[in-house]
Amino acid sequence: MLRNLTRFLPLLGLLLAAGAAVAGPGTVGEAEKQPLNVAAIAMFVAFVLSTLGITYWAASRTKSTADFYTAGGGITGFQNGLAIAGDYMSAATLLGLTSMVFAKGYDGFVYIVGFFVGWPIILFLMAERLRNLGRFTFADITSYRLDQSKVRTVAAISSLTVVLFYLITQMVGAGQLIKLLFGLDYEVAVIVVGILMMVYVTFGGMIATTWVQIIKACLLLGGGTLMMLLAMSHFGFNFENLVTKATEVHKDGTKIMGPGSLLADPVNAVSLSLGLMFGTAGLPHILMRFFTVPDAKEARKSVFVATGFIGFFFLVVVLLGMTAIVLVGTNPDFYEGGNVGGKMIGGGNMVAMHLAKFVGGNIFLGFLSAVAFATILAVVSGLALAGASAISHDIYANVICKGRPQGGSELKVSKIASIFIGIAAIGLGILFEKQNLAFMVGLAFGIAASANFPVLILSMYWKGLTTKGAIAGTICGLTAAVVFVVLSKAVWVTVLGKAQAIFPYDQPALFSMPLAFLVAFVVSKLDNSAQAQQEIAAFDDQYVRAQTGLGAAGASNH
Amino acid sequence: MSSAAYERIRQNPKFDKLVATRSRFAWTLSAVVLVLYYGFMSIVAFNPTLLASPLGEGRIATIGWPIAACMMVLFWVMTGLYVYRANGQFDQINAELIKEASKEGQ
């Protein structure tokens, strides 16, 4: 099991942050269908009923496009911070990172720091500009002073690509996880997730999506903390005591207390951390969260709150992984055939679930399973909303209608788009059940970091960016990310069955992201057209708005 | 928003001062985060045994654990520092700027 896990660890890393649940069939694969878990289903039904109640309430407040896309800008910084934390702390974070610390000790901690470090940077360099310039989608910012139709079309295509890949991994992960935890059929699980997602998004828009995310974040934080406290009580809440026992029973002994083989290839580690850091800052559903607060003040506050909760949760996860080495790793109940150190029941990603069962029995296991399901539901809703806004706000309202959609038609289009995205997600989720999807998460983050992030940053920071440069940069980043991933081990060897990967790293960002920056820069520099001159001249006004928020969209009245 | 209001803000010396101070603060904090993180990663890659030194005589716990945890806490405290200054001191100058720009416009 360990060797198998090690092989997937680098990709697992991306998987986790991507919230892709346990999509890598290398780890869960042929998830055994478990007997029906009544406690888990009961708690999940309670969650669904309360979120449907919220959706009903949210629907009565979702009247305008601003309500639908961004909750009318009426979310407070604290609420939004919880929602951002919720978007980032997925079921996969809990399951995957716990398993990583369980298997690798300190190396897992090093990875966790890498998942965290992007947040302060997003606050210092992006948060206030995003809020001051954007309204509904990040293309509002990139196209601010550039050619609306062209820049928005390209941005919408790359947004939809990211959303689609991410959504497929979530759906497949949901199906497998639910089959494993709840004992439901794969197809049933995928259809339930898809339909609930459509209901939340279509009726409740961003208000419902945000509240589903907030509730889930609280459940995950509360459940995780409680589990950590229960587990630590077995060691008298003493870290020294914990690591003494853990190093006694772990097969790597005291080696787990320092950096080991996981980071033997620094280039790979750096590329992975770049992809995570800047991929996060280029994910459409995360960027959209910055537009749900009234002003830059609240936007900053929300990142502070989100960073605090994410950091706290990650530290909890480190302790969960370490306690599990002793509490789960030596317990024959959690291994197939009672063979300790052999194949873990449910696969290597189930460590946190087994720990829940050990410290809190079947009820707590059921609770945590329900939280995991709720988590996936909340993340796919955010994704569907981001995809729908790319279709209705960027493509329909601004490209097709040239910024003047007929009254109410944009809202209608966005709701229809949400339904289509939901149907597509169900269909693709079922279609891809048995596929190896590890590469898709790498791809989603790679594209976000290479196609969305560079042009977004340049549009905010560099006066010289022109329409041609922005389009060339986006297309180049998108293409490079796709090509590198296809040539990497995850596709070239695992999917296509070739002997040797041409691109030796797991994450393309280290190469595709600088390439996109370079191309956007060079093409902009070479662009001497009259239009380019105008676009450069328009930067000055944009700069004042980015810095001061003067003219930025405010909150609607509620 | 009219270009004239933006022009007036640009003319206001407070604007340059605001932007310069806030940017310097933001870039300094970012640099601290990146230097600490990549410094840490370099130790992980090139001198891993350093992080594996025990916390004390006969102890199993190593210095790597508190170092990584403190780094995360420090980064969070730094976000708090930025928000405190940006939402207080900087936003006050910002509000004055906007007020002056709209007053002159009347």
Image (cartoon, rainbow, N blue to C red):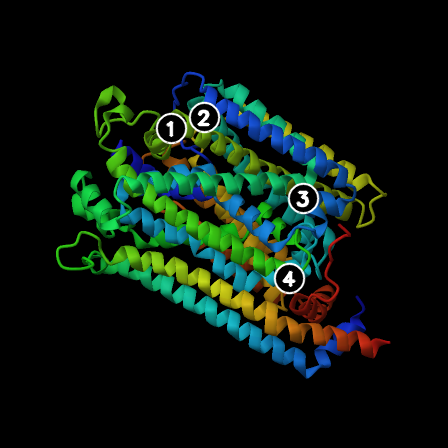
The residue labelled by disc 3 is A390
Q: Amino acid at mark 1?
A: Val
Q: CA distance from mark 1 to mark 4?
A: 42 Å
The residue labelled by disc 4 is A296
Task: Assign a secondary structure to mark 2.
Answer: helix
User: Residue A176 shows which numbered tag?
Assistant: 2
From this viewpoint, which residue is outermost toward the bottom? Answer: B13
Q: Are marks 2 and 4 on the same chain?
A: yes
The residue labelled by disc 1 is A28
Visible in this render: residue A502? no
Q: CA distance from mark 1 to mark 2?
A: 8 Å
Q: Tell which of A520 and A152 is nearer to you.
A: A152
Image height check: is A537 above or below A312?
Answer: below
Residue B19, horizontal then vertical, whole percent: 61, 75
Q: CA distance from mark 3 to mark 4?
A: 23 Å
Q: Amino acid at mark 3?
A: Ala
Image height check: is A522 above or below A311?
Answer: below
Q: Earlier in the sequence, mark 1 or mark 4?
A: 1
Label 1 packing within 10 angstroms: few (<14), some (14-19), many (20+): many
Residue A220, horizontal then vertical, whole percent: 47, 40
Q: CA distance from mark 2 to mark 4?
A: 40 Å
> Do residues under tags 1 and 2 come within 8 Å of each other at their CB atoms?
yes
> Do residues under tags 2 and 4 come within 8 Å of each other at their CB atoms?
no
Q: Amino acid at mark 2?
A: Gln
Q: Chain of mark 4?
A: A
Instruction: State the image quarter where residue A366 is shown.
Output: top left
State the residue at coordinates (52%, 42%): A217
